Amino acid sequence: MNKMTKKLFSYFAAILIFLSLTAFFGFVLVLRYYSFRQREIDLQARAETIQEQLEQFMQMSGPKQGKGAYLKFIDDIAMADAYIIDTAGNPFSYGKNAIAKNLPSEEVKEFAARVFASGTYEHSRKNDKEGNPIFYAGVPVRANGQIVAAMVIHDNVSIDQYGFLLAVTVLGICMTSALVLSLLLAIVLSKRFISPIRQIALTIKELTLGNYQVKMKVYDKTELGELAKETDILAHKLDAARAESQKMEQMQKDYISNISHELRTPVTVIRSSLEAICDGTVRGEKIEEYQMQMLEESIALQRLVNDMLELSRLQNKDFPIEKEEMDLLLTLEDAKRAVRVLAHNKKINIFYEKDVEECLIEGDYGRLRQMFIAVLDNAIKYSEFGKTVNVKAAKQECGIVISIKDYGCGIPKDELDNIFTKFYRAGQRREKGSGLGLSIIKNIAERHDIQITIESVWQEGTTVRFTIPDTIIVHFD
């Protein structure tokens, strides 16, 4: 028996013993009370019977001898010590030979005085030196409306001790048997109650050791069953969190690897070019070619560093962005003009339509322009020569929706869930990049309470939607 089972059993045992003792002593006291009460009722009935007979004798005329003889056998009639006492405290006399034969003691006289004082039935119970109960019952005897005597019965015969002890003994045996059986049942129930708790404790111990695949296997309709279900849910979430953590850790490793590669390439090119120039290996017109190559690599390196710094600033909620009232549609058109050279080089036509002329919001013009340029740049970059990019601004129930759709290579379905993850970089891309572009776009949108979603079909194209809710629109036309 484990510690918790012992503790629970001790609680059960204490409660059962307390209830058993309470019931036992309560029964004994009640039985004793009703036994004494029944004796008192019996004595009252005898006293009142004798009282009625005496009062009838008082009213009868004729010889008093036969009536007085009744007093001589009063003990036999009362089946106990009986006393008839007059108002002076002496044995009552009724005629020449009609005197109550029992001489009252001082205690009887005192009790008779109580009867005279109250004028009604009186009773009392005392214990003698041996502890046996003594019962007194007294009633007044009237003649012509006046109290002339007190009828007192004194009975020192104890109640049926044998019957009383037998009842108590039988009760004690029954309650002891019931207590033993209840304690045995308490052991069984304690173990049954503790069993799911032990299972839960073992499962939680496994969880602390990192085994998130463990299951409770507790089928209980009480709160323990609910606890087991919630613990299973917790284990599942911890397992999912661990998998996600491992995934993020791997993505971070991949990100660092990609960044290291992106940094290594321009640094290597710049260093090797400088070494070639310094060593005199490259002369004449070749020097200018090497210089241009170093310039291009340094620009790419600067762009990568700027992206990393930009993302770091945007993710810091304490870093402020300068917001002012601006027209979001004018910002979109400005971004469209900024990428027209890139679109022209690939013979890509940007088709723009709108059903609203103006959309005023509180925003950072430079950040939002950067966001639209990045999306348009990706749309052009991943589209084939001669394709079209559709840009549309439309009023809908949720607010104003700006969509940018290309017909390029698209994004594989299994990559869509991670497309905004800052440590994620799609591996099946023809264009180079740090994998930070979409993370920057998403953070700019979130800082302006703009919702961004991406829908894409592999080898068919991608649609990026910006939903500007009514809550942030100052005015639209």
Image (tube, rainbow, N blue to C red):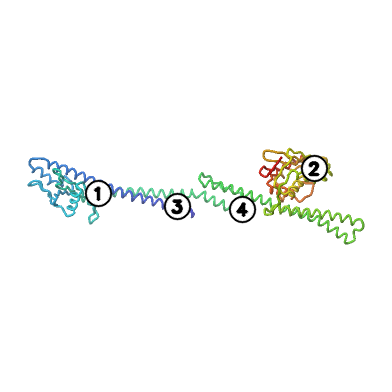
Q: Is residue 125 visible?
A: yes
Dot 1 amino acid type: Ile
Q: Is residue 427 left or right of residue 74?
A: right
Sequence-wise, the earlier of marks 3 and 1 is 3
Q: Is residue 403 left or right of residue 46?
A: right
Residue picked out by circle 1: 159
Dot 2 amino acid type: Ser
Residue picked out by circle 2: 383
Q: Residue at x 80, y 42 (%)?
A: 383
Image depth: mark 4 or mark 2 in front: 2
Instruction: Quadrant for the C terminus, please.
Output: top right
Asked if disc 3 and disc 1 are in contact, CB closer than 8 Å, the reply is no
Which residue sits furthest right? 284
Sequence-wise, the earlier of marks 4 and 2 is 4
Residue picked out by circle 4: 210
Residue picked out by circle 3: 9
Q: Position of residue 80 (x, y in %)?
A: 18, 48
Mark 3–mark 1 Cα distance, whole angstroms, equals 41 Å
Q: Position of residue 226 (x, y in %)?
A: 54, 46
Q: Is residue 456 visible?
A: no
